[in-house]
C-alpha cells in the first residue's frame, strides 16, 4: 500500500483517497466546509488548505488525492494563516446572530471560527443582507448566514435527484436558492438543514424550540419503513425535539427521509390516547379493563390477535407466547402496509432510501412465522400497534386496541389500552435486508401507557397479584 | 521587423476568402497538414516553434496538445477561447475582424493534430459584429470544402461551431468557458483533472486563445525554426500582438517580435509615446490583472520571462499607459470593482475578498480611509492570492498589492484629506 506522511506521521492509504480522510486516521483534523463525504468534491470554500511538499501553493486537502511519498503539513504558519484568513473572509458578511440561531452550538462556522479564527474582526464595511425565504413546509432559509459551500445544491442534484437548489447572481451577491423561488419538492428536504454548515437552512419543525447544547442524543433506528435507517433522536426532559440521520454506510449513508425524520411528532401528538379509553365510560381504569379483557377472552368464540409489523421482535414474540398459552385457538396474523402483505411485495419506493413497507419489522414478523392477516369475521379482535401500521378493517363484535392510537382511531374500538411508541421502548427490528437493529428507548411514555409485555403479563396473571395501575 | 498579422488588419475586404487565398497562402497549410503530415508531426512542429499560449498564462502550446491522449474512446475537442475579456485586450478582435480564415485554418490544423472532429469557438457575447463576421467566414469555409466532411478529399471531417457567451469575464477562464459551453453556470472547475483529460463534455480537450490558434498556419507555412527564431528569448517564439491603450498618442494593436524591444520602445516608438506631451507615470503591462509598473521600470524586455522577473506578467499582451495626472487610487478602485463584479462567487477568498477590497478602496477614495487600511489591503490581497480556485483571485490581488506598494503616497493623500475624489 502506498504511504504518505501527515504532520510527521506515516500513514497508508488507498489510491484515490483524499488528504482530509487520510489525516483523520492519524488524528489530524483538517477543517472543512464544502467537503462532505457523501457529495462530490468542489474545493470551493478553501478552508482545508494544507502544505504539500514540492507544491508551490497550498493545496485543498479535500480535492487533492494523496500520492506515494507525499509529505503534508497542516500546522505550518502558512496553513494557520490561510485558515484564519478564510475564517475572516467568511465572517465579513456573516451576521453575528448566533444567540438567536438554531445552528448555534453545532455550527461548523462557529467551531472552525473558535479553532482557527481570530477574535478580532477587521472589516468595518456594511454586511450584505437578504430577506428570509420560506422554502416550503420543511426548510426556512436565512441567506445572510449562507457561506456558499454549495452542499445543498449538490445534495439536491446528486442525492435527492432534483436540481432544485441553485446559485443565482454571482460573486459577492451569489444567492443560493430554488429555481424561481419554488418550494422544495424533495421528500428528503430535512437533509438540507443537516448538511448546511451554518444556520442558513434550518428545519421549520425545530426552529426556536431548543438550544442544541441542551439536547440529549440517543442512537436508534427509524421505524418509518423497512429500510431501517440509523438515527439519532434528540430529546430533553422527556420531549423529543428532532431526529437526525446517523452515518450508516451500508444502509442510509448520511441521509434520512422527511417522513422518518418527523415520525416522532406522531408519538407526541396532543390527542394521543395516554389513558385507558373505552367507548362507554370516561372513568375506566387499567384494573377493570384488564379484568374485563380477561373474561372477554375466556368467553369469546372466535378471537383474532392482529399484530402490527411495526412492533419489535420481542413484542411479537411475547404475543406469540401468550396466544399459545392462553388463547391457543385464536387466529394470529400481522398487518402493516396495505398492499404490502409480505416481504416479497416490499421493495424500494424511490431510488434513495424509502421502502414500500411503511412498517419497520415486516421481516421480523415473517421470521417469527407470522402470516398476513386474512379477512374474516370474529367475535373478538385484539389489535396491537406502535402507531405506524395502518389499522386493518376487521369484522368483530368486540374490538380491543393495544398500542399507540389517537382519539379518532380509538373511536373504532370498544377499548383501547395505551401502549408505547417506538421512541419509548428498547427492542429489535429486522430490516428489509435481514439486518437486526436495535431500537432504543429515547423518552419515557407520558400518562399511563404500559408496554405490551406488561399488558400481556397482567392478562396472564390469574388474579394473584392485585391492584394494577 | 517581421509581422504576421498586422499588415492585413484595417481593411474590411481582407476578411474574404478571396483575399485570404490570394494574399495569405490561404488553406495551404491545412491542405499540407491533412494530406501530407501525421498529427504527431504537427504537434512536434508546434513544439519546435516555441509558441507559448497567448491567452494569458503563456503555456507552451505544443506541450498542451501533447497532453491529450492519443488514443481515446471518447471524442476529443479543440476549443478556441475568443472570450477576450481581460480589460485592455483587443487583439483577438482584430484577428477575427480582418483575418477570420486564419483562425479557421488554425482550427482545422489543430483539430487534425489532436484528433478532433467537432471544434468550438467560444466568443464573448459583446462581440456581436465579430460573431457575425466569423460565422460568415465559417460558412464560406464550409461552402469551399475546408470544413465539413472529407476535407481536401481526405477522410478527415471537421465541424466548427461558434458559441456566443453571455457576457461574463470569468467565462474566459478555460474551465468556466467549458462549463458555459456545456450550458452550465460559468464557474471554473477544480483542477486536476485538467481539460486535456477531462474537458468539454468530460472529454479530452485543448483550449487555446485566438492568437495562438491563428498563428499555427504561419508556423506550418514558414517553418517552425523560422518562427522560433523570431523570438529573441529561448523557448518563446514568434511575434506578439500588443494591445496598447490609455494615455498614448496612437493606441492600437501592434505586432512585435517577442523579446526584440523593450516595453518603453513599444510605447514610445510604436504607439507614439505619452499623449499631450505629458510624462508617463505608470504602465499596466499585461491586461488589468498584471501588477503595475512605474515609469522607471518599463525598460524591460518585452517577453514573458523578463516581465516575470520584475514581478509582473505579460498576460494577454495588453499595455495600458497612465500619464502623470492619472489618479492611481481611482484607477485601482475601478480595476478592483471589475474583478469583484466578475468574481463567480464560488470560492471564499475571491467572493468575499474582492468585494471587501473594493469597499475599502471606495471608502478611501471617498475620504473615509484610515492609515491602517493600506496594510490591511495588502494583507487581504495576500490572503486572496494563491488561495483561490482559479486565477481570478490572483488577477484581483496582484494589482492591488502593486498599486499600494508603488503609489502609497497617493493613497495617503486621500486618507489624510489632502486630496478629494473629483
Ligand atoms: C479569470 C481568467 C480570465 C481569462 N480570460 C481569458 C480570455 O478572455 N481569453 C483567453 O484567451 N484566455 C483567458 N484566460 C486564460 C485561459 O484560462 C486559458 O489559459 C487560455 O485560454 C489558454 O489558451 P492559450 O494556451 O492559447 O493561452 C483567462 C484566465 C483567467 C484565470
Ligand atoms: S477565484 Fe473567484 S472566479 Fe475563480 S473560482 Fe474563486 S470565486 Fe470564482
Ligand atoms: S473543504 Fe476543501 S475547499 Fe472546502
Image (cartoon, rainbow, N blue to C red):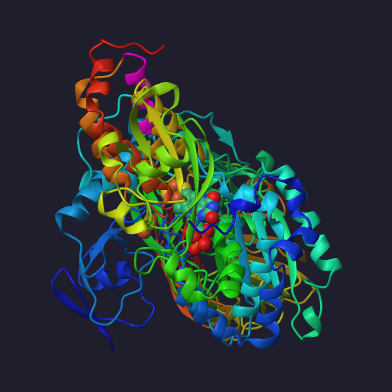
Q: In this rendering, does residue B37 appear at all?
A: yes
- Which sits in the foreground, A456 or B358? B358
Q: Is residue B158 above or below residue A168?
A: below
**Displayed quadrant of residue A374:** bottom right
Q: Residue, x 29% and y 56% (percent of image)?
A: A31
- Which sits in the foreground, A268 or B122? B122
Is the magenta region chiefly helix, strand or loop? helix
- Which sits in the foreground, A108 or A384? A108
| x then y, percent, for residue A87 | 29, 43
- Residue found at the very far right of the displayed protein: B143
Left or right: A446 in relation to A399: left
Verify whether residue A457 appears in magenta. no
| x then y, percent, for residue A405 | 61, 53
Q: In this rendering, does residue A127 appear at all?
A: no
| x then y, percent, for residue B308 | 30, 54
| x then y, percent, for residue A270 | 55, 41
- Which sits in the foreground, A271 or B348? B348
Q: Residue, x 36% and y 50% (percent of image)?
A: B313
Q: Residue, x 58% and y 66% (percent of image)?
A: A294
Quadrant in which the C terminus of chain B is drawn? top left
- Residue found at the very far left of the displayed protein: A8
Q: Is residue A7 above or below residue A43?
A: below
Q: Is residue A223 above or below residue B400?
A: below
Q: Is residue A276 above or below residue A157?
A: above
Numbered marks: total: 0
Residue range of the region highlighted in magenta in the rendering: B356-367
Left or right: A416 in relation to B12: left
Q: Residue, x 55% and y 85% (percent of image)?
A: B41
Amino acid at each position: 500500500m502506498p504511504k504518505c506522511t501527515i504532520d510527521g506521521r506515516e500513514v497508508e492509504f488507498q489510491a484515490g483517497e483524499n488528504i482530509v480522510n487520510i489525516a483523520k486516521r492519524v488524528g489530524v483534523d483538517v477543517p472543512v466546509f464544502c467537503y462532505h463525504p457523501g457529495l462530490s468534491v468542489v474545493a470551493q470554500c478553501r478552508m482545508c488548505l494544507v502544505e504539500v511538499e514540492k507544491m508551490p501553493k497550498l493545496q485543498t486537502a479535500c480535492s487533492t488525492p494523496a500520492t506515494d511519498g507525499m509529505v503534508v503539513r497542516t500546522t505550518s504558519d502558512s496553513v494557520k494563516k490561510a485558515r484564519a484568513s478564510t475564517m475572516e473572509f467568511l465572517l465579513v458578511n456573516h451576521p453575528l446572530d448566533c444567540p438567536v440561531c438554531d445552528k448555534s452550538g453545532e455550527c461548523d462556522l462557529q467551531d472552525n471560527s473558535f479553532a482557527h479564527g481570530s477574535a478580532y474582526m477587521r472589516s468595518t464595511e456594511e454586511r450584505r443582507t437578504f430577506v428570509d425565504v420560506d422554502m416550503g413546509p420543511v426548510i426556512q432559509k436565512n441567506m445572510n448566514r449562507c457561506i456558499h459551500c454549495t452542499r445543498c445544491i449538490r445534495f439536491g442534484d446528486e442525492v435527492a435527484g432534483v436540481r432544485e437548489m441553485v446559485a443565482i447572481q454571482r460573486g459577492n451577491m451569489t444567492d443560493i436558492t430554488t429555481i424561481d423561488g419554488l418550494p422544495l419538492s424533495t421528500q428528503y428536504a430535512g437533509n438540507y438543514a443537516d448538511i448546511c454548515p451554518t444556520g442558513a437552512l434550518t428545519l421549520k419543525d425545530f426552529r426556536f424550540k431548543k438550544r442544541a447544547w441542551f439536547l440529549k442524543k440517543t442512537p436508534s433506528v427509524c421505524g418509518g419503513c423497512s429500510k431501517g435507517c440509523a438515527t439519532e433522536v434528540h430529546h430533553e426532559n422527556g420531549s423529543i425535539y428532532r431526529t437526525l440521520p446517523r452515518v450508516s454506510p451500508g444502509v442510509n449513508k448520511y441521509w434520512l427521509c422527511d417522513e422518518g425524520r418527523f415520525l416522532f411528532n406522531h408519538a407526541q401528538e396532543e390527542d394521543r390516547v395516554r389513558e385507558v379509553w373505552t367507548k362507554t365510560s370516561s372513568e375506566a381504569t387499567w384494573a377493570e379493563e384488564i379484568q374485563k379483557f380477561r373474561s372477554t377472552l375466556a368467553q369469546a368464540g372466535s378471537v383474532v390477535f392482529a399484530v402490527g409489523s411495526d412492533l419489535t421482535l420481542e413484542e411479537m414474540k411475547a404475543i406469540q407466547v401468550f396466544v399459545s398459552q392462553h388463547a391457543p385457538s385464536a387466529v394470529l396474523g400481522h398487518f402493516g402496509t396495505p398492499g404490502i402483505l409480505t416481504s416479497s411485495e416490499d421493495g424500494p419506493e424511490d431510488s434513495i432510501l424509502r421502502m414500500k413497507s411503511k412498517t419497520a419489522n415486516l421481516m421480523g414478523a415473517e421470521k417469527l412465522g407470522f402470516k398476513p392477516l386474512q379477512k374474516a369475521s370474529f367475535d373478538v379482535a385484539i389489535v396491537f400497534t406502535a402507531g405506524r401500521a395502518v389499522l386493518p378493517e376487521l369484522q368483530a363484535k368486540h374490538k380491543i386496541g393495544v398500542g399507540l392510537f389517537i382519539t379518532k382511531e380509538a373511536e373504532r374500538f370498544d377499548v383501547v389500552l395505551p401502549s408505547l411508541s417506538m421512541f419509548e421502548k428498547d427492542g429489535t427490528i429486522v430490516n428489509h435486508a435481514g439486518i437486526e437493529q436495535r431500537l432504543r428507548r429515547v423518552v419515557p411514555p407520558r400518562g399511563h401507557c404500559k408496554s405490551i409485555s406488561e399488558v400481556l403479563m397482567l392478562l396472564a396473571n390469574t388474579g394473584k397479584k392485585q391492584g394494577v395501575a | 521587423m517581421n509581422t504576421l498579422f498586422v499588415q492585413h488588419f484595417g481593411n474590411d475586404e481582407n476578411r474574404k476568402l478571396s483575399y485570404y487565398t490570394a494574399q495569405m497562402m490561404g488553406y495551404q497549410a491545412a491542405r499540407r497538414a491533412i494530406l501530407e503530415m501525421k498529427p504527431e508531426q504537427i504537434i512536434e512542429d508546434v513544439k519546435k516553434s516555441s509558441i507559448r499560449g497567448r491567452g494569458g498564462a503563456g503555456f507552451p502550446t505544443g506541450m498542451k496538445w501533447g497532453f491529450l491522449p492519443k488514443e481515446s474512446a471518447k471524442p476529443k475537442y479543440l476549443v478556441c477561447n475568443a472570450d477576450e475579456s481581460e480589460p485592455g485586450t483587443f487583439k483577438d478582435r482584430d484577428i477575427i475582424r480582418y483575418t477570420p480564415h486564419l483562425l479557421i485554418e488554425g482550427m482545422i490544423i489543430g483539430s487534425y493534430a489532436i484528433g478532433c472532429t467537432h471544434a468550438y469557438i467560444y466568443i464573448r457575447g459583446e462581440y456581436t459584429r465579430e460573431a457575425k463576421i466569423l460565422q460568415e467566414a465559417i460558412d464560406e469555409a464550409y461552402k469551399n470544402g475546408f470544413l465539413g466532411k472529407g476535407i481536401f478529399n481526405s477522410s478527415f471531417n471537421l465541424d466548427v461551431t461558434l458559441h456566443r457567451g453571455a457576457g461574463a469575464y470569468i467565462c474566459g477562464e478555460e474551465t468556466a468557458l467549458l462549463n458555459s459551453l456545456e450550458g452550465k453556470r460559468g464557474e471554473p472547475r477544480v483542477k486536476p483533472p485538467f481539460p486535456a483529460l477531462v474537458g468539454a463534455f468530460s472529454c479530452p480537450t485543448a483550449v487555446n486563445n485566438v492568437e495562438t490558434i491563428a498563428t499555427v498556419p504561419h508556423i506550418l507555412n514558414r517553418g517552425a525554426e523560422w518562427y522560433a527564431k523570431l523570438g529573441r528569448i529561448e523557448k518563446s517564439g514568434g511575434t506578439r500582438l500588443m494591445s496598447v491603450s490609455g494615455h498614448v498618442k496612437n493606441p492600437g494593436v501592434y505586432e512585435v517580435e517577442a523579446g526584440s524591444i523593450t516595453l518603453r520602445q513599444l510605447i514610445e516608438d510604436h504607439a507614439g509615446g505619452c499623449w499631450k506631451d505629458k510624462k508617463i507615470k505608470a504602465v499596466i503591462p499585461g491586461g488589468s490583472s498584471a501588477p503595475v509598473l512605474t515609469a522607471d521600470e518599463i525598460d524591460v524586455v518585452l517577453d514573458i520571462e523578463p516581465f516575470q522577473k520584475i514581478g509582473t506578467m505579460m498576460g494577454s499582451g495588453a499595455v495600458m499607459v497612465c500619464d502623470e495626472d492619472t489618479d492611481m487610487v481611482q484607477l485601482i478602485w475601478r480595476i478592483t470593482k471589475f474583478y469583484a463584479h466578475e468574481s463567480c462567487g464560488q470560492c471564499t477568498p475571491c467572493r468575499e475578498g474582492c468585494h471587501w477590497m473594493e469597499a475599502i478602496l471606495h471608502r478611501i477614495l471617498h475620504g473615509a480611509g484610515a492609515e491602517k487600511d493600506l496594510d490591511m489591503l495588502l494583507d487581504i490581497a495576500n490572503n486572496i492570492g494563491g488561495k483561490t480556485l482559479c486565477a481570478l483571485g490572483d488577477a484581483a490581488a496582484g494589482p492591488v498589492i502593486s498599486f499600494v506598494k508603488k503609489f502609497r503616497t497617493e493613497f495617503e493623500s486621500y486618507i489624510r484629506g489632502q486630496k478629494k475624489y473629483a
